[in-house]
Image (tube, rainbow, N blue to C red):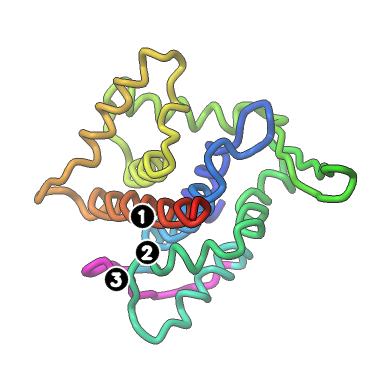
Amino acid sequence: MEMIISRQFTVLSLHPERGRITVSAASFRFALAAAAIADFYMNGELSEEDKRLTPSPRHNGDPFHDRLIDLIANSAHPKKILYWIRKLSRKSRQNLEESISVFVSGAGIRHEKKYFLGIFSYSRYYFTDPGVRSSIVENLREIVINGKNPSDEQLLILALMKATNSLSHLASEYSERSVIRGRARELFKKDEFASKYQKFARLIISSVTVATAAEESSYVA
């Protein structure tokens, strides 16, 4: 399955019973774009220097991957990750549909189209196989509760959850939330000896946070 980080993040953001995204619309929109960028980075299709991204794109036949990597590939000059998060997030509904399509077309998630007032359509995604989500949650709990070292992929997924204030979704009881917050501080603290993935994770957190705050403040204004 391609786009591993973006698809896992989408599954984690779905409510296990209600079929809807559990984080704010703006937060999810920017974080899903950042998740795609994280996939490109993991695949060696992007390099980062001074917070700017240089593409080395490759098509793989995945509609989500190919559509978004083309947007980055057509850039004349390297641009900051915040710029690309905003640009890639513009077709948020299509991004969600494409990121989750592999589960809907295969097995694990059922898509239902509903209507508000019989006119306005919206989508719900229900787990037909709860293990699709619970297996990801349990693997991440090993990190944030039991202190297991994360893989680079898991580190970036946790960064996306921190950026969307959804790390608490990994808690099975309220008392675990402080443990999770403490573990997140440890994973994402500034450290000159941090790996490139830890540094990229912090960049994702700051960029998604900035984009989301700007978007939500515009609603108030």
Which label's residue is closer to the chain start, 3 or 1?
A: 3
Which label's residue is closer to the chain start, 2 or 3?
A: 3
- Total numbered badges shown on the rendered structure: 3
Give the residue drawn at x 49%, y 69%: 87
Question: As drawn, which residue projects farthest toward the front?
Answer: 221
Residue 21's mark? none
Q: Is residue 120 above or below residue 48?
A: above
Classify 10 Å Cα crowding around label 2: few (below 14), some (14-19), many (20 and above).
Answer: many
How far across and down, in percent of the image, does residue 18 sit? 68, 29
Residue 182: quarter of image: top left
How far across and down, in percent of the image, does residue 174 sit? 41, 14
Q: Is residue 48 rendered magenta in the image?
A: yes
Q: Report the residue marked by disc 3.
A: 52
User: What is the magenta range?
Assistant: 47-60
Q: Nearer the viewer, residue 144 or 83?
A: 83
Q: In this view of the protein, can residue 4 be seen by the observer?
A: no
**Circles 2 and 1: CB atoms closer than 8 Å:** yes
Q: Amino acid at mark 1?
A: Val
Q: Secondary structure at mark 3?
A: strand
Q: In this view of the protein, can residue 218 be seen by the observer?
A: yes
Q: Report the residue marked by disc 2.
A: 82
Q: Report the residue marked by disc 1.
A: 210
Q: Amino acid at mark 3?
A: Arg
Residue 59: quarter of image: bottom right
Give the residue drawn at x 15%, y 46%: 190
How far across and down, in percent of the image, does residue 196 sit? 22, 55
Which label's residue is closer to the chain start, 2 or 1?
A: 2
Q: Secondary structure at mark 2?
A: helix
Give the residue drawn at x 30%, y 50%: 201
